[in-house]
């Protein structure tokens, strides 16, 4: 058991809303606005979206509840949570893989987050105040990301800001930031979506995005959609175990999961409504990869009245959405080092942020600055995309599998249900959740992994 003094040092959310906003802040980020549109674009559009939605609500939501319940029950970081519920076993390795994955994801995520800051400055200083064509926009993007000083400098800046907030702790730093700007992001996205769907040529984009063509489904669709679901919901690396460990026993976890999954999905779907019509309007290809959002949106802003203002607001809010996610990514290794190694928060933050920065440098140089990193040998893509596939897809998928098996069979459905079965949760919920976490999630994930190995379609 934690002593009152110990739990005061760990910190906790000051309210239910604070927790829901912080967890939604973790879930909502570049995954929704930057990654979702480009994986949908590469995955063939609407058919991919449908599969994605199935994964979010059938597998992702069940895993999220398992993570939050385990975190709240043990009041520990991911490694400590497994140690407390399965002492002396190797289960702690699932938690440890999560801690490593957190650092790895943050290392490339911080690069993209840095780009959003760069694009904010570009917009403010008028780079996109005049109408630009798609190819001009591609050129500007290409030149910007190939500049090593800008990419590495912005990565450093972004990780620095993240570190300062994480240093300030759970309710003073993380919760306060999350509470303020999430609603503003939502409002702005709605406005942009309205503008985008009314552009000429929007119809083709909407058809690509909303009318499923199942012939576009390939071997890659399922792992990519499942990986995106885990990535977007911040699952499979213990972020939700960590955030769950700061939640008061009074909070209804089931309704919290419903709200977080709903908000996360709504923002991703909205981002698609902005990107795809605009994309077809300017004639770019949906499979433009990691640069998609950065190439499409400036052309849209250039066509809007007060476009410069919209553009600046958009990139600023996107940077903030990214910040509430990088905070949760850094909080996982930090909470581990504090709980398990007994370090002070300050020392833990400086050490983990420094290591993350060093690992992030190759990703920052992988979009043109260093040609080897930008075009790896063989079938592998550039270094940043490779990190995103290995850690953003596979590591989170395997971590979620470990969590589902652990919660479903080792810690047990009864113990988990005792943590979430509070007032207002109907009795039928437990057997449904038990089915999802014990059968559907593991069978679905293993099926997909076997399929990938059999078809050798790793990227
Ligand atoms: N969910 C975040 C996003 O969609 O941008 C990314 C992320 C944060 C993934 C935290 C994993 C994580 F633990």
Image: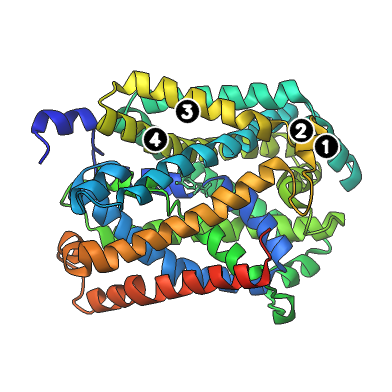
The residue to which callout 3 is attached is: 162
Q: Quadrant of the C terminus?
A: bottom right
In this picture the colour scheme is: rainbow
The one of 44 and 76 positioned closer to us in this rendering: 76
Q: Is residue 194 above or below residue 362?
A: below
Q: Are marks 2 and 4 in contact (CB under 8 Å)?
A: no
- Secondary structure, mark 4, is helix
Q: Residue at x 71, y 47 (%)?
A: 290
The one of 381 and 287 positioned closer to us in this rendering: 381
Picture quadrant where residue 197 is located: bottom right
How far separated are the C-alphas under marks 4 and 3? 13 Å
The residue to which callout 4 is attached is: 333
- Secondary structure, mark 1, is helix
Relative to 424, 256 lies left or right: right
Q: Position of residue 118 (x, y in %)?
A: 69, 28
The residue to which callout 2 is attached is: 145
Q: Position of residue 342 (x, y in %)?
A: 25, 26
């Amino acid at each position: 058991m934690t002593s009152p003094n110990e739990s005061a040092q760990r910190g906790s959310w000051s309210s239910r809303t604070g927790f829901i906003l912080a967890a939604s802040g973790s879930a909502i980020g570049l995954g929704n606005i930057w990654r979702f549109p480009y994986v949908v674009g590469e995955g063939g559009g609407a058919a991919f979206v449908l599969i994605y939605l199935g994964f979010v609500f059938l597998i992702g939501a069940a895993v999220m509840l398992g993570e939050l319940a385990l975190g709240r029950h043990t009041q520990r970081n991911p490694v400590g949570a497994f140690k407390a519920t399965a002492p002396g076993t190797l289960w702690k390795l699932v938690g440890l893989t999560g801690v490593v994955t957190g650092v790895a994801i943050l290392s490339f995520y911080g690069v993209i987050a840095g780009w959003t800051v760069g694009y904010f400055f570009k917009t403010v200083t008028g780079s996109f105040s005049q109408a630009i064509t798609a190819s001009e926009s591609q050129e500007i993007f290409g030149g910007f990301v190939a500049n090593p000083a800008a990419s590495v400098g912005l990565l450093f800046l972004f990780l620095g800001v993240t570190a300062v907030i994480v240093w300030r702790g759970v309710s003073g730093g993380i919760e306060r930031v999350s509470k303020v700007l999430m609603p503003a992001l939502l409002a702005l996205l709605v406005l942009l979506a309205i503008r985008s769907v009314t552009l000429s040529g929007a119809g083709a984009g909407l058809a690509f995005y909303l009318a499923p063509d199942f012939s576009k489904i390939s071997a890659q669709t399922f792992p990519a959609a499942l990986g995106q679901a885990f990535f977007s919901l911040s699952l499979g690396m213990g972020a939700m175990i960590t955030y769950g460990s700061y939640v008061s026993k009074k909070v209804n976890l089931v309704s919290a999961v419903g709200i977080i999954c709903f908000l996360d999905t709504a923002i991703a779907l909205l981002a698609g409504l902005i990107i795809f019509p605009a994309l077809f309007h300017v004639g770019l290809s949906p499979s433009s990869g990691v640069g998609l959002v950065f190439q499409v949106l400036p052309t849209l802003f250039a066509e809007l009245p007060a476009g410069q203002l919209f553009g600046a607001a958009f990139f600023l809010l996107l940077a903030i959405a990214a910040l509430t996610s990088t905070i949760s990514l850094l909080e996982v290794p930090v909470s581990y080092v504090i709980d398990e190694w007994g370090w002070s928060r300050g020392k833990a933050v400086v050490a983990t942020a420094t290591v993350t920065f060093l690992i992030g440098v190759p990703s920052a140089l992988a979009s043109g600055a260093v040609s080897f990193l930008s075009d790896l040998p063989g079938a592998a893509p550039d270094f940043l995309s490779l990190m995103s596939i290995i850690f953003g897809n596979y590591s989170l998928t395997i971590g979620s599998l470990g969590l589902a098996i652990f919660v479903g069979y080792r810690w047990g459905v009864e113990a988990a249900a005792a943590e979430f079965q509070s007032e207002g949760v109907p009795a039928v919920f437990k057997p449904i959740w038990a089915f999802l976490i014990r059968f559907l999630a593991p069978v679905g994930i293993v099926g997909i992994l076997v399929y990938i190995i059999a078809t050798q379609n790793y990227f």
